[in-house]
Image: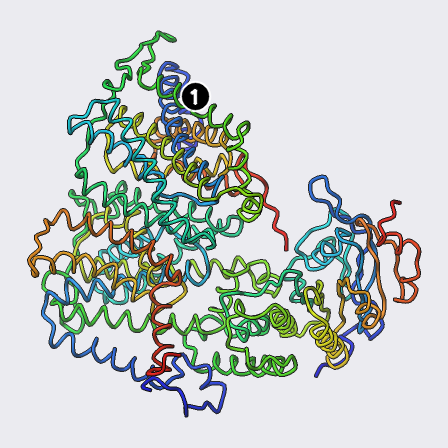
Amino acid sequence: MLYREAGQFKTDYTADMAVFPILQDRIGIVVILAIAGVIIPVFGNEFLLQAVMIPFLVFSLASIGLNLLTGYTGLLSLGTGAFMGVGAYACYKLTTYFPGVNILIWILVSGFFSAGVGVVFGLPSLRIKGFYLAVATLAAQFFLSWLFIRQPWFYNYNVSGAIEVPTRTLFGIPVTGATASEMTRYYVVLGFVVVLTWLASNLVHGRIGRMWMAVRDMDLAAELIGIRLLRTKLLAFAVSSFYCGVAGALLVFLWYGSAEPAVFDVNLSFFILFMVIIGGLGSLTGSFYGAALIYILPIVLRYIPPKIGIPIQSAMVEHIQHMVVGALIVFFLIVEPAGLARLWQVGKQKLRVWPFPY
Amino acid sequence: MDLLYKIFIDPFVQMGMAPDLLVQTLWDGLVAGVLYSLIALGFVLIFKASGVFNFAQGIMVVFAALTLVGLHEHGIPAYLALAITIAVMFGLAVGVERLMLRPLVNQPDIILFMATFGLTYFLIGFGELVFGGDPKVMIASQLGLPKGAIDVKFAGGFVSLQKIDIAATIIASLMVASLALFFQKTRIGRALRAVADSHKAALSVGISLEQIWVIVWFAAGLVALATGIMWGARSEVSFALEIIALKALPVLILGGFTSVPGAIVGGVIIGIGEKIGEFYWGPLLGSGIETWLAYVIALVFLLFRPQGLFGEKIIERI
Amino acid sequence: MRATGGPDIAVGDVLLSVENVSLAFGGVKAVSDVSFDIRKGEIRAIIGPNGAGKTSMLNVINGFYHPQEGRITFKGETRSKMRPYEAAEGGIARTFQNVALFRGMTALDNIMTGRSLKMRKNFVWQLLRHGPAMDEEVEHRRAAEEIIDFLKIQEIRRTPVGRLPYGLQKRVELGRALAMEPELLLLDEPMAGMNLEEKEDMSRFILDVNDHFGTTIALIEHDMGVVMDLSDRVVVLDHGVKIADGSPAEVMKDQAVIDAYLGVAH
């Protein structure tokens, strides 16, 4: 009853091909943006922003990046952590050498560095397919991890091996560094994520998204239609790594405030991959769901049980989290391989006919 | 010019100048390679029979070792602990078959591969929960494994061969030989190969997929246990081993995913390649290139021979 | 909808020819020294018993397999091997024996992928979507809808193709090939697995494509009735070798052809 499309007729193709053709969906997006843009910052406390919302947004962005490569183009990548690292370190070096330039610009530029690295490690994808390609991305992951630890140039020869984020401002307000407030950082991250998500959505709904999905579904047939495989795959690597690079820069500059190379290790790659799998391969909204579930779950595990009287030590939380995440992955793959996004779609279908059962 | 000399000439000069060091490095590489091969062997077993790439093989190694040591810590004598661990691995195989493989039987391979990710994480959490996260010492001597080293005089110096390494190599070879025989000669081995080729066809001749899968995962579990014991005896039993297990991937790429001899050859090549690379070329680049050298070797290999040394050439029919 | 005859090639002239093509996999010879041509505007059938090398021949034309020997001449240009995108850009489209649709997409999207070669607006426009990229999408959507109307698959345009029955999948695949506005359409067993009604529908579509759009068609087919009714000329392969070439009536009476189908050793 609520979610009916009846009466919403489209009179031209443009309207028919809109990303959100149904009015209720459009209203939903506006509501979500309002919540994200107004309600949360105003009513939420610093903890909510720092420990929940900012990382959720950062991981969602990284998940979108990986989803473009693995979910839409079908190229399994285990190098997400390293590509995020490239973005973070690129941003760090850029702002070290050119501190006068606005940090937001450097964050975007660092995405391009990441994209370049992504293209280089994506070159083998012409000859190597599917699962073997994942090993190539592992080569990228381990090599880059090693590079960040072993080449002190990356962390400005800092003795600790870590990078400390300097204070940078935007219109006089500090956005990075110790003096930047949670609210400022939240808005910057939100801005990036909203814009980049919109761009990703445009891409996947048009010609390029179709080309990527064609390569994923049957690359031989795609070739015979005239789709150039190498260019399409490299484009996927480039765009995906761009997103991961920006996410990495945001992670360090607008969330952690500092970073050790170990942050961008293979475990991060798996972390993001799980978000994409559970959220739904080939779905942008799924990236958000997956990030929410995988990232917020341990926080829930940490704080809820003591509140309802079950004592769990903090070390145990991590172990239980691993078990739950692992079990959830298997569970989702059994129940709904297309992840939370598909579950949501199925739910919407039921909403369309509600209160009737079918 | 100087750089070219450093890359292409100097390492070989060094090799020649201290041949005992070279042999030592080769031996260390061989031993590491044998252990990589064992892990790869577990992968091959499962992949041959079910087409599933069991990412959890690495954690199974850790899990098996932890179970063994953990039981012993609670006062159970070594051989009894071993027997119980074997039973646990069997239970694991049954559990995996029933809870993971059966519900996913018709899904594409990539889904099953991702399910093994889930299994990995689950076992990591479970293992940490039950056994704690601290590294443990393998009960090598209690199991009758030799300690100490044999020093062999060679070319003016000497080469030190750890007895445990010799034992590991022998045991691994025995394992490989018996597995190869098993696949070729026995009825169950033939059934396994049939299942690897086509589930549907195997079903149609009456092979019980469930039984086969339990057998195969159990066999992989035994291999994992052996690997865990060997590896734990050489260093220690910790979750860091799980990452080392990722090294099995380059081994499989070299050796092919379905070849038992390939796993051995691949493992040895990777093991030796890594050690030689690290020892003679490592200082040029900064140490620690072992972490990625294997993957780069595999990558280069893939570019020239996408199906590995022993794998079948993939001809796609359209 | 389309003018007959390309820049240089008039209806009736040779559009594509293969000369002395040989193809082997490892030690297995799939095609041995086969030569034939396809004339513009005709419907050419390629027939033969199973394993004759018919699909391999199509794959060579497409550029998916590269022959060890021989040449392919298409629209006047001769090559020793074709590349898939050269074939596609040159105007060769194809359907497959085992329907090769993109299963993760809807029927409409599958057909729209067929327009990929014609969609020019670059990456930056695609990022924005609104504006020139959208205009291009609409323009090609129109073209896709014409094909959808032609093939009468309006109701299923938004259905994920994995859910469609086999006959409809084949129709969508034809639609995707047509979306490329090909000069030469290669159909690999388009009637396979169809019942009589579906075959009649598909035959009608093939004839319409040839009549209205002027598309040259080469098809592999086992149903002799279809071959007799639809094709202008037939080439017969057996064990990788050409054993007959001519009109359907001539070929049906050829003793070598009859022997091949009956399995007489020669």
Q: Quick one: quadrant of the C terminus of chain B?
A: bottom right
Q: Quick one: quadrant of the N terminus of chain B?
A: top left
Answer left or right for A148 relative to A68.
left
Give residue A139's position: percent from left, percent from top.
Answer: 39, 44
Residue beneath the point at 37% across and 73% down: A345
In the image shown, does C148 or B211 lie closer to the viewer? B211
Give residue B32's position: percent from left, percent from top.
Answer: 36, 27
Q: Is residue C205 above or below residue A13?
A: above
Residue A16 visible somewhere in the drawing: yes
Badge 1 is on which residue? Answer: B174
Image colouring: rainbow
Residue beneath the point at 38% across and 25% down: B29
Answer left or right for A32 relative to A115.
left
The image quarter containing residue A280 is bottom left
Give residue A277's position: percent from left, percent from top.
Answer: 36, 58
Q: Amino acid at mark 1?
A: Leu
Residue beneath the point at 82% across and 75% down: C10
Q: Name the subunit of mark 1.
A: B
- Disc 1: CA contacts within 10 A as few (<14), some (14-19) or many (>=20): few
Answer left or right for C2 relative to B40.
right
Q: Is residue A216 above or below residue C6?
A: above
Give residue A228's position: percent from left, percent from top.
Answer: 56, 61
Q: Is residue A12 above or below residue A315?
A: below
Residue beneath the point at 82% across and 54% down: C237
Residue C90 visible somewhere in the drawing: no
- Residue farthest along the front direction in this orientation: B206
In the image shown, does B144 or B165 lie closer to the viewer? B144
Answer left or right for A326 relative to B191.
left
Secondary element type, mark 1? helix
Number of numbered discs: 1
